[in-house]
Image (cartoon, rainbow, N blue to C red):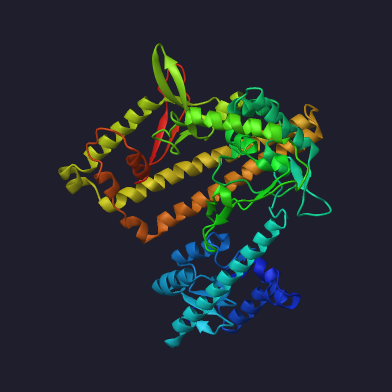
Amino acid sequence: MKACITAIYCRLSKEDMDKDNEKAVSESIKNQIAMLEDYARERQWDIYDYYIDEDFSGSDRDRPAFNRLIADSLLGRFQIVLCKKQARFARDIEFVEKYIHGLFTERRIRFVAVLDNIDTGAASRSVRKASQINSLVDEWYLSDLSENIIAALTTKRKNAEFIGSWAPYGYRKDQLNKNKLAIDPEAAKIVKQIFDWYQAGSGVHKIAGELNARRIPNPLLYKQLQGEKINPNPDRHSAMRYLWTPSTVSAILHNRTYTGCLVQGKYKKASYKSKKLLRIPRDDWIIIPNCHEGIIDEETWNDVQKRLESKCRTSSHRQKHHLLAGRVYCGECGSKLVSSGGKSGNRRITYLCCSRHNIEKDACAGARIESDRLEKLLLDQINALTAEFFDAVYLAGHIDVSQIRPASRLARLKSELRYLQDQSAAADRKKEILYADRLDGIITPGQYAEYAKKLDAEAEALRLRANSVSAKILSLENQEAAQSIGIDPLERYQAADALSRNMVIQLIDSVYVRKRRKGEPQEITINWNF
């Protein structure tokens, strides 16, 4: 008799840990594992692996262990998914239907929730109904919990209690009252300097450049150096996370908190199922004056706001996103290319330049290319591809249409993985050099600790991204479904005479531009969406 291979899934969330002690112990990961191991042992099921998510809600769609479980189910690595209760797997009706009664059924994977007496391998027709009723009750629970939390937080805001996870740069949470802000003298000096520089006529780009030139830690790095566990934005290039940027400076100049006002309730979640934040109209913000000591006075604040508003009116009519915004990156450091004006004789030219090089010249060699030149190159490439792909004779004799998109995407992902691995190896080499500098007395132990922490953060971000790309590669190589995608997006743009934003979004995943070297053609890599 062939042994049943079982995957054990356990989850514990904040709402579970906040319950009374007796219930928290019963829901603990250790307790869940012990119960499920006994259950599997009694039935002589072999355990393939443990999938454990701690501090994640049952409605969270980005649980790492959960996503790994789903990926392994697609690869047919087990025949049973075993949980203590269905709510441990998901408290979302959509997830229950999509995975328990959808994917798992199609893959002939049994789902077993021990305490709910749910076993999709049983012959009874009532199992699905019981599962659906449980998921509905779980979803009601989450909805009620979300409403209660929102009401409690709103009350705290109106009572002038600071409820943010981290204090704004320039402040720290008061040691005697975590719901009150106290000035952080070191960071407050930088905030005051930023306002003084702006009043003196420096723009946000110049201020960011000056702060980087002085090697002043940006707000994220500063908080991390103070021992606060802040996770950087995973969508932002690792090297840019620790630099001052014009947007960071602008955010400080627009933050009324520095006048002593407590400003909260600027965003809200789209729903308890979503992590997306929606901006609330300014008139609905909760603003309470004189809640803490201000870093700048009202006169300075009003003067800076007038200057910002005037600058915005002057530049808004001429500013617009370039056609390739969000798709073009520096091939030297991976940062985004941003639009920048220039001149050639009497001709006005728009360039795309490395955003990192713009704010710290020594940090990157700095890729740069004329916007019109790159747009023409991309249009020519698209037209060449459409002419090749849709030649009837060529299609009939040479192309298996079902294989085009997966193969191209797979090649792109493998190329990205190699790039990430190279960057990771470079980070390791930097740390080795840094350690040698410490031993030789070139840098102090304190400087070593600061720089090493920064390199470790970059390495961790690279590792997480590489793991994500590896999972995508594995999924593409093993899932039959990935082999059935066609090339419809390309078909609609045959013989195009101009590049449009829609074409860019639908056809182009990313473009990497290297710095032009003397005597060599500029290297440009295009990663397509098909």
| Tally of numbered tags | 0
* 31 sits left or right of 371 in the view: right
Q: Position of residue 323 (x, y in %)?
A: 38, 34
Q: Position of residue 99 (x, y in %)?
A: 45, 70
Residue located 36% across and 57% down the image: 482
Residue located 61% across and 27% down the image: 360
Residue located 59% across and 24% down the image: 361
Q: Position of residue 405 (x, y in %)?
A: 33, 49
Asked whether the viewer can see residue 83, the reply is yes
Q: Residue furthest left?
A: 393
Residue located 70% across and 44% down the image: 168
Q: Residue furthest top?
A: 345
Q: Quadrant of residue 491?
A: top left
- For the residue pair 450 and 252, the one nearer the viewer reads as 252
* 33 sits left or right of 446 in the view: left
- For the residue pair 384 and 360, the one nearer the viewer reads as 360
Q: Quadrant of residue 350?
A: top left
- For the residue pair 299 and 250, the one nearer the viewer reads as 299
Q: Position of residue 195 (x, y in %)?
A: 68, 30
